[in-house]
Amino acid sequence: MRFVPLLLPLAFTISSASCGKKAAAPTDDQGSGSARATVAPIAPPTLGVDAIKALNFVYDSGAPAYLKAMNAYKATPRDWAAVQAACEAAITKDPRHLDAHRLLASALAQQNKPAEATEHLLLTFAGDWGKYGAAVANDPDLEPLRATAHGQALAELLPKLEQNFRERAAAGIWVVGRRSTFKLPSKGGWTTSRGELYAYDSDNQRYLRLTHTDHQVEGFVRTSNEVAIVTFDKVDLPVTAGSKSRDAGVVAPTIARAAIQILDATTFAPIGKKVTLPAAREIRVGYAAGDQLVVALSPAVSRWELGVPAVSAVDKTTGKLTPTTATIVTGVTITLDDASATHVAQGFDVVGVSETIVTRPGAAAALRATATKRTIEVANSSVTMQSLNASPDGQHVAFATWADPCDATQAPSLYVADTAGTVKHVLTSHSRFDTRWLSPTLLAYEDDESAVRVWDLTTGRETMRFAAKAGLALSALSPTPKPTCKTAAPAPAAGGSGSGSAGDAEIEMEPTAPADQPVVAPQ
């Protein structure tokens, strides 16, 4: 698993380091032998990608040609002309292949073509600043470019791009998105969620990639200073003995290896050590009082029944787990069948049940404003409420009614209520309705089509919607955007480890072991 912190030295300085045969430095940017020309300041590119699926390039049509480019790069002596030709072939197949653009920039720099090299570098910076921008300063392959006017102009641009990225990442709507569809493998073994953490820049309608985990992110929990991401890279499909005879021989998909990594919420640099978790049917990760990070791991008893969870506090420095009785206040709950989030409903009380957040059917519950004692009622006053989430000012609460996912005639509804007891209906849909308050008046929520919508309570209207067909979530990715029916076990998908659906337009070249050291363009 690899995390790329953004706070790295970005001075594009001339370096004496070299790798392989050193190319002769050009006398000017055009190679004419005259005094070095000057170039105009480079305009900053728009950061981000318009669709998360654009970052699936590693497995798309340009992959075979890029592999040839890497072979030419690794050859002795290095054949830069062959690298260039293969990269151009990859880009012809897939213009969004950022690794090919990045390696092509090195090949062009080594062949004294600074203008063309700069053009391809800018494409990579725009598509994934965290991966390509932060690492470019120390790449010896780009040494010939640094001595040129284009190199100096690029050096002036880098700090501006860094600042722009931080500002837009901070202001964006954070989501977990998949690069391509996910299905359970037919056999256990290495596979990933295919997800990463992104910030959606609504001004430019772009996704800014925030994490680099080889697409292993399944969910995240954020505080003001840090973000804890939950990843997995191995699954198991054990057959349960069953506590009842009807459960015998049932497959209960288990996350065989998961991890928690705490990142700085501004720079995305790792904080402390990564926490590797033991196998579990269900993983709950979140924060208790005092921002104590807590994890609860539950084994499988039967296909849907869980055993008693082992609850531990996480030492953020050492990554060690210590048993605790602390209760998670905000967090995510993850299985290979479903995912949900737990939020704070401060200022509102649930009457009739013992839990603040109701995530499953149970006794009828009523919602009441703590300060005003006003009861909040919906059309069916006996419904169970779930997904409670109070606004930052404590004046409103978002909640959804519960409906049986196995009954196609039922669908939950999302509402927003205030402390006076006034209730506004937002949407009725077959959705899990995870929510996030972006401000005291703007509510983001998930629908049933892998999309996030933003609703303005002052106007009672939707102001924004963005989607990723392969999967998009405000907190944690589920296999489908609709709630899971938990009365029967779905058959595992055919097609090998983590394969996409038959309709996916991609060349599937997933590695067969964890990609701790993925093959990417040199940095």
Image (tube, rainbow, N blue to C red):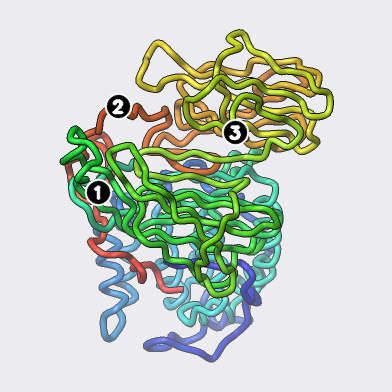
Q: Residue 475's x, y, as percent?
A: 54, 43
Residue tagged by mark 2?
487
First in sequence: mark 1 vs mark 2: 2
**C-alpha gap between disc 2 and disc 3:** 25 Å
The amino acid beneath tag 1 is Ile
Q: In which quarter of the image is the N terminus?
A: bottom left
Using the rendered view, name the quadrant where residue 344 is placed. Answer: top right
**Going by the image, does 58 lie left or right of 361?**
left
**Going by the image, does 299 lie left or right of 350?**
left
First in sequence: mark 2 vs mark 3: 3
Evaluate whether residue 9 shows in this view.
yes
Q: Which residue is drawn at 43% across and 85% down?
A: 23
Q: Mark 3 Cα within 10 Å, few/some/many (few <14, many 20+)?
A: few
Q: Do the residues labelled 1 and 2 touch (CB within 8 Å)?
A: no
**C-alpha gap between disc 1 and disc 3:** 50 Å
Q: Residue 384's x, y, as percent?
A: 55, 21
Evaluate whether residue 42 shows in this view.
no
In-front residue for pair 200/411: 411
Residue tagged by mark 1?
507
Disc on res. 354: 3
Q: Do the residues labelled 2 and 3 touch (CB within 8 Å)?
A: no
The amino acid beneath tag 3 is Ser
Q: Mark 1 Cα within 10 Å, few/some/many (few <14, many 20+)?
A: some
478 shown above or below 404: below
**C-alpha gap between disc 1 and disc 2:** 35 Å
In-front residue for pair 493/418: 418
**Going by the image, does 17 lie left or right of 21?**
right
First in sequence: mark 1 vs mark 3: 3
Disc on res. 5: none
